[in-house]
Image (cartoon, grey):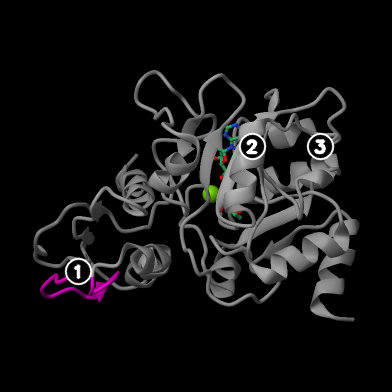
């Protein structure tokens, strides 16, 4: 049996698998199976108020589950398959388990671009819920080995290193104004070029499940560091001197995003007094990187 057929049969039995996507690896399960949904929350140690993203191979496949707005169609045409998640209203006949929505009247959906993920979704022809394949609050995995560090018995499809390296951008389309719930793998500027201004958090907007602390390495993180202190490791960007690793020596934000979680993971495995990170500009994918770093720097 091929790896893909094995993955399909596990999913049909209600089991969980590791799914490579272009952003990060996901912990995927059949979104129509409530037991499988409960297992995702249980295995990750994820609070049940934090809803999941539903992955599909086509918008049409979910037409009885969600209310598809004209803006959703426009964004889908431009960015799918790709690292964009849209939050839409659940339709009255929605088949997706309510646990995936954490009881909310909305559903987050995306079509991933990774060829293996797309092939699997077409083959099984059922929506799959997939949070990032890490224990709650840990770094998101961008390789199969990183997934196996947190879930050693999981069946994980090998899809190579994730090319985007940060999670999808999440846009809320359930209300009157499109809203940014999470900066991610598609730059906000690119989305605004298609649909105009998008409301941003900070002005009373609260995205469900977006915790202050998240994506944390074991070592402490010191952000916007201009040099490294005694005993620290330095994660550089651009022409940083004395960097232990550099996200992108040429200052390319796309390259830096693809290296972010993996390099943090590598530095975290070395003894140190903490990880210092060079400043990263707040443009393009820099928004998503700074968001992950800020949450990763929060200590209990
Ligand atoms: O790139 C990605 O999006 C990856 C890959 C595997 O597809 N998945 C991912 O899932 O990042 P996760 O569970 O780590 O993050 C999902 C986030 C939640 O924390 C929540 O903030 C948001 O999606 N979300 C899910 N459903 C939502 C909803 N109905 N309304 C608002 N936000 C929602
Ligand atoms: Mg996650």
Give the percent coordinates (x, y) of residue 202.
Answer: 34, 25
Q: Quadrant of residue 57?
A: bottom right
Q: Is residue 247 magenta?
A: yes
State the SS at label 3. loop
CB atoms at circles 3 and 1 under 8 Å apart? no
| Quarter of the image where the N terminus is located | bottom right
> Mark 2 against mark 1, which lies toward the viewer?
2
SS at mark 2? helix
Labels 3 and 2: the sequence-earlier one = 2
Q: Earlier in the sequence, mark 3 or mark 1?
A: 3
Residue 238's label in the rendered image is 1
Q: Is residue 186 left or right of residue 50?
A: left
Instruction: Give the Cα distance between marks 2 and 1.
Output: 36 Å
Sequence-wise, which precedes: disc 2 or disc 1? 2
- Mark 1: secondary structure: loop
Residue topped by disc 3: 96
Q: Is residue 95 left or right of residue 27?
A: right
Q: Which residues are magenta?
A: 238-250
Q: Position of residue 71 (x, y in %)?
A: 61, 34
In magenta segment, residue 79: no
């Amino acid at each position: 049996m091929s790896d893909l057929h094995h993955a399909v049969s596990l999913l049909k039995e209600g089991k969980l698998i590791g799914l490579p996507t272009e952003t990060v690896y996901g912990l995927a399960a059949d979104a129509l199976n409530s037991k499988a949904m409960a297992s995702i929350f249980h295995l990750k140690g994820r609070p049940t108020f934090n809803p999941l993203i539903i992955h599909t191979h086509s918008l049409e496949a979910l037409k009885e589950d969600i209310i598809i707005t004209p803006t959703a169609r426009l964004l889908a045409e431009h960015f799918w398959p790709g690292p964009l998640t849209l939050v839409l209203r659940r339709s009255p006949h929605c088949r997706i388990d309510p646990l995936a929505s954490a009881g909310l009247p909305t559903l987050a959906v995306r079509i991933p671009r990774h060829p293996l993920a797309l092939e699997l979704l077409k083959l099984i022809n059922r929506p799959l819920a997939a949070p990032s394949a890490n224990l709650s609050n840990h770094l998101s995995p961008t390789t199969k080995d990183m997934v196996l560090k947190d879930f050693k018995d999981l069946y994980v499809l090998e899809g190579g290193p994730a090319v985007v390296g940060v999670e999808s951008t999440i846009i809320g389309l359930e209300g009157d104004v499109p809203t940014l719930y999470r900066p991610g793998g598609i730059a906000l500027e690119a989305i605004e070029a298609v649909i105009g201004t998008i409301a941003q958090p900070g002005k009373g907007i609260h995205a469900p499940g977006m915790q202050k602390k998240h994506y944390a390495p074991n070592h402490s993180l010191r952000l916007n560091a201009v040099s490294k202190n005694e005993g620290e490791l330095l994660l550089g960007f651009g022409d940083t001197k004395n960097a232990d690793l550099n996200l992108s020596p040429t200052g390319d934000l796309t390259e830096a995003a693809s290296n972010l979680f993996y390099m943090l993971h590598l530095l975290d495995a070395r003894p140190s007094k903490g990880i210092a990170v060079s400043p990263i500009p707040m443009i393009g994918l820099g928004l998503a990187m700074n968001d992950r770093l800020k949450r990763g720097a929060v200590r209990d």
